[in-house]
Image: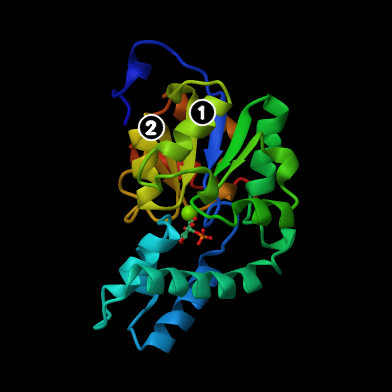
């Protein structure tokens, strides 16, 4: 992405990091999968991990629509509402047992670095359970804003949630960095005019500015270098260097 955007003309400092939740801070995808799989099996609809990949970052109702693509029966809006509730009830039973031990590697260190540096942070999740999950993980003190699916009307890939966080923090888009594990989430970040750091596989997150496997692979210093475009991140040598886990 170097060479593009307004960073080529003047320097804008990093003032906030906007985090997706599921798959970035905690691996709730496995609980979403178990809950959707239970529903699909009951309805006799084929559903596997590959289809599940398409649900990441996507709203509950849009996820249901993806699952129902393979259904021979057509469902009314009321029936779909009931199916989504059935899935969510099963999901919430599992997710209520979540503890801080399930926070993904490197997350707390990076959040601490942001706090110490005075850089703001926000959760920007499609999930209506986002607030409850952040509470259960004891992560509230690290975030200036916790925005979830109930705060917005247009789910990702619409940029609404990132724009809302930006506005609540009193910033402009070019001061914000989004951390996301879903293609749809990175589309939303880009539509909001923000840089996007992908967590996961480069082959999937092809639209991210840079991709790391997890948060042990970088620290705030690296993020500043990336954000300020002082390193050419699309060069293999730089990526190889940044990919070393910092705690090894
Ligand atoms: C996203 C998940 O964070 O939240 C999706 O990646 C999920 O898989 C979406 O469908 C909505 O979550 P919820 O908890 O409101 O059903
Ligand atoms: Mg996610």
Residue at image point 66% right, 40% down = 111
Q: Name the image quarter holding residue 104.
A: bottom right
Pick the quarter of the image with the N terminus.
top left
Which of 180/72 is in front? 72
Q: Which residue has dot 1 on it? A: 166
Secondary structure under tag 2 reads loop
Asked if residue 219 can be seen in this view, the reply is no
Name the one closer to the observer, 100 or 155: 155
Q: Which colour scheme is used?
A: rainbow
Task: Say whether residue 36 is left or right of residue 8.
Answer: right
Residue 189 x, y percent position in the rendering: 40, 38
Circle on res. 11? none
Count all numbered tags in the image, as a single digit. Answer: 2
Q: Residue at x 63, y 49 (%)?
A: 106
* 184 and 79: which is toward the camera: 79
Give the percent coordinates (x, y) of residue 108. 69, 46
Q: Which residue is drawn at 38% across and 64% down?
A: 63
Structural crowding at the residue carrying mark 2, measured as other residues with C-alpha within 10 Å and reported as few (<14), some (14–19) or many (≥20): many
Query: Which percent across, then down, holds residue 61?
Result: 40, 62
In the displayed structure, does residue 59 sit left or right of residue 94? left
| Mark 2 close to ligand 2, CB under 8 Å | no
Q: Are marks 1 and 2 in contact (CB under 8 Å)?
A: yes
Residue at left offset 46%, top offset 47%? 180
Question: In this rendering, is residue 222 above or below 76?
Answer: above
Q: Residue 115 appears at what percent x and percent y?
A: 70, 31
Which one is earlier in the sequence, the residue at label 1 or at label 2?
1
Mark seen at residue 192? 2
- Badge 1 marks a residue whose secondary structure is helix
54 or 117, nearer to the observer: 54
């Amino acid at each position: 992405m170097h060479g593009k955007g307004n960073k080529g003309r003047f320097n804008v400092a990093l003032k906030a990091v906007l985090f997706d939740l599921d798959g970035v801070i905690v691996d709730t995808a496995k609980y979403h999968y178990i809950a959707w799989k239970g529903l699909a099996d009951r309805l006799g609809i084929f559903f596997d991990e590959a289809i599940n990949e398409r649900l990441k970052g996507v709203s509950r109702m849009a996820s249901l629509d993806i699952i129902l693509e393979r259904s021979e029966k057509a469902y009314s809006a009321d029936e779909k509402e009931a199916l989504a509730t059935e899935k969510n009830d099963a999901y919430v039973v599992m997710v209520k047992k979540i503890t801080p031990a399930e926070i993904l590697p490197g997350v707390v260190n990076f959040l601490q670095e942001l706090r110490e540096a005075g850089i703001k942070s926000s959760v920007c999740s499609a999930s209506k359970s986002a607030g409850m999950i952040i509470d259960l993980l004891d992560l509230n003190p690290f975030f200036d804003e916790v925005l979830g699916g109930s705060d917005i009307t247009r789910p990702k890939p619409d940029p609404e949630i990132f724009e809302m966080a930006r506005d609540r923090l009193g910033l402009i888009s070019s001061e914000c960095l989004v951390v996301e594990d879903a293609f749809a989430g990175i589309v939303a970040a880009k539509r909001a005019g923000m840089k996007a750091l992908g967590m996961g596989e480069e082959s999937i997150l092809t639209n991210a500015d840079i991709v790391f496997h997890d948060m042990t692979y970088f620290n705030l210093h690296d993020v500043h270098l990336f954000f300020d475009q002082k390193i050419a991140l699309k060069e293999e040598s730089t990526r190889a260097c940044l990919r070393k886990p910092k705690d090894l």
